[in-house]
Amino acid sequence: MSHLRILIADDHAVVRAGLKSILDNEMEFSVVAEASSGEEAIEQASIHKPDIVLMDIRMPGGMSGIEACEQILRKLPTTRVVMLTSYAEDELVMDAIRAGAVGYVLKRVDSGKLIDDIRRVMQGEAVIDSAVARTLINEVREAAHIKEASVFADLSERELHILALIAQGLTNREIAQKLYLGEGTVRNYVGKILSSLHVANRAEAAVFAVKNHIERYVALPDEE
């Protein structure tokens, strides 16, 4: 029976010992090496070519677990890296995933779940602790929000208001009345808006505004 070869990389000896004790109790697993830094993890991975690396995301010294993950996968693309963290709110979760990690689990995970997670990873699944997943979802949502907001970055607050009213189908005269502006002033604003958004007419501007959820960024005056 072939064993899954595992490298444990964590700067705390007690954590490494605990993980090794759990994994050594499973006949299918073999802990082939340990590392206490990112640099050592790369060195040991190159020597032992593990199937799985359990990598502490926050390593001391000049190289983080994320950087070590990237370098290991560059040399050993078939190796699977599972990141370990002490915090469900770890802001590095997205960086770890971008680096190629296929798992992200809390160090306090119970032994049965850790073993199950490793088996799932070797079957080609990605495993993320449920508490960490909530953080990941929030980060994705925030990134989407920032992306949406950036499409309006060239517009002033006044131009945003006018664009939102255009999206509601108001004419220049109606916008002027609502915002207490001259109709000519509104016309000038509309021209600037079309130019900033690189659209040809009001209809295209309205579609652009709706598509990018302008209502999330503009507090319109109350209806009279």
Image: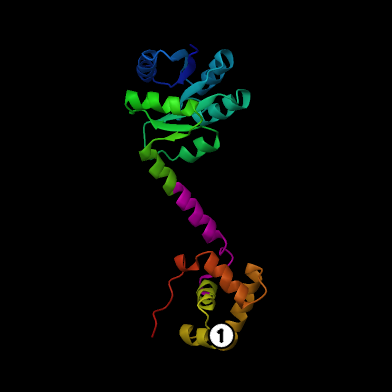
Quarter holding residue 46: top right
x, y (%) of residue 149? Answer: 52, 60
x, y (%) of residue 77? Answer: 60, 26
**Disc 1 element:** helix
x, y (%) of residue 58? Answer: 45, 29
x, y (%) of residue 109? Answer: 34, 28
Three-letter amino acid code at disc 1?
Asn
Q: Residues within 10 Å of mark 1 (few under 14, many from 20)?
A: many
Residue under pointer 1 = 172
Vertical relation: 105 (above or below) 184: above
Vertical relation: 185 (above or below) 19: below
The answer to whether any part of residue 213 appears in the image is: yes
- Is 27 magenta? The answer is no
Name the residue at 50% across, 67% down.
214
Residue closest to the far front = 1
Vertical relation: 221 (above or below) 69: below
Q: Which residues are magenta?
A: 139-158
